[in-house]
Amino acid sequence: MERNWPDGVRAVLHVDMDAFYASIEVRDDPSLRGRPVIVGGPKDARGVVSAASYEARRYGVRSAMPLRTAGRLCPQGVFLPVRMERYAEISAAIFAMLDRFSPLVEPLSVDEAFLDLTGSERLLGGPVVAARSIRAAIAAEFGLTASVGVAPNKFVAKIASDLEKPDALVVVRPDGVRAFLAPLAVERMWGIGPKGAAALRALGVATFGQLAQADPGRLRAGFGSQVEALQALAVGRDDRPVHCSTAPKSLGREVTFPEDVTDPETLHATLVHLADSVASRLRRENLQARCVTLKLRYAPFRTLTRRTTLQEPVRTTSALLEAALALFREKTPGAREPVRLIGLAASGFGAQELLFSSPAEERGTRLEGAVDRVRERFGAAALKRGTVLASSRARKDRKGTEGG
């Protein structure tokens, strides 16, 4: 019989589906079982890997990796297109099943969620028993596997669910949190990102235990005001509640031109404006995005969309614009083809739960947050980016010359 969870102590589960997209493809086509499955498109396409089965991961294939790189690493892999409608359909059914276990289910993305099971002893037998029941229900009802972490808070539960993937249950009891975290590599610190982990290692901090004991003054040069929060997490302190998320799935803006446009300056200035608008909304909603989508409509009404997955979550104009321009330059045909509509969208808001940004992203967020406050007080036109103003003046000058 499972040992009871201590009375009055929070019990949080993190449920994370194993290689979700790839696992659905294998479930729908059993002939793929045991083979390296890579979801994202043809291996010679310019896109990125959306998901890789564990067989493919043994060859070094990872999500967000360019498909061409995945093709070189795993030429015998089965490369499949993304079937988002199918994945969303199964995701919705899984979340409906999770609602049977708790009224507090917080989705992070289509394939992972937090559940608060505090005080579930009488109804469910306690959080550990409930975790086993959830994994059994996912296997029986959907033919899929999930890894689950059980802990006193979200941060530790998230780390626990990832520790022994796939198809694992890791329980971290309240009296064992510090001992569980201390030997873990800083790369496992959810939310810090590869750049942050590299910066810690450069300071001689390689584990959670070393981070907890490090001199805050040494860390402050690289992490600023984040140091206290980092060291609190290193010993497993995290008071964030589990809540039912109402965040939008994507935020975007688009512009339809009165006349088809081929001028690169106009298109660039419009992308700057769109990135600025979307970034401002991300900050207002306290969201970070990991996916950027560019939408182009050509004459006659031929629409092209391209999407990229970023290594780290962002919410600044510069980061969104960099991704959008890369999509425009590298993934669209004929830069001079007349454009009727251009749009930019940000999504992948599972990253909103990431606790830290890179130092550059944090500086950019602070600067652009100041711009947001000026605009709120004096109006949207109070501050405009130089690129937009310069392009606007250039268009006016050209019109004046042409009309003279």
Image: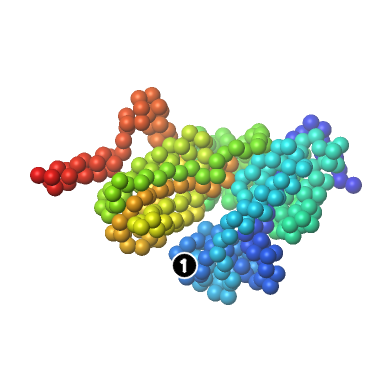
The residue positioned 13% from the left and 45% from the top of the image is 403
On screen, residue 263 versus residue 193, left or right, reads left
Residue situated in front as seen by the camera: 229 or 323: 323
Place of residue 81 in the rendered image (x, y in percent of width and height, measured from the top left): 55, 64
Figure check: 317 above or below 373? below
197, 300: nearer the viewer: 300
Q: Residue furthest left?
A: 404
Residue 26 placement, left or right of 329: right
Q: How is the image coloured?
A: rainbow
Of residues 269 and 85, the one nearer the viewer is: 85
Answer yes or no: is residue 259 visible. yes
Which residue bears the numbered disc 1?
45
Label 1: state its secondary structure.
loop
- Residue 402 position, x and y percent, is 14, 47
Q: Is residue 112 above or below residue 42?
A: above
Residue at image coords 67%, 57%:
18
Residue 391 is drawn in which quadrant? top left
Residue neighbourhood size for the residue with mark 1, other residues' Cα within 10 Å, grouped as few (<14), some (14–19), many (≥20): few
* Residue 238 seen: no
**Residue type at tag 1:** Ala
- Answer above or below: position of 138 versus 270: below
| Residue that protrudes farthest toward the front in the picture | 300
Quadrant occupied by the C terminus:
top left
Quadrant in the rendering for residue 20: bottom right
User: Where's residue 318, x and y in %?
Assistant: 38, 45
Q: Position of residue 164 (x, y in %)?
A: 70, 56
Taking the view exactly as shown, the residue that stands out farthest to the bottom is 76
Q: Residue at x 47, y 55 (%)?
A: 308
Please give the name of the residue rendered at 54% of the width and 48% of the height, measured from the top-left corner: 348
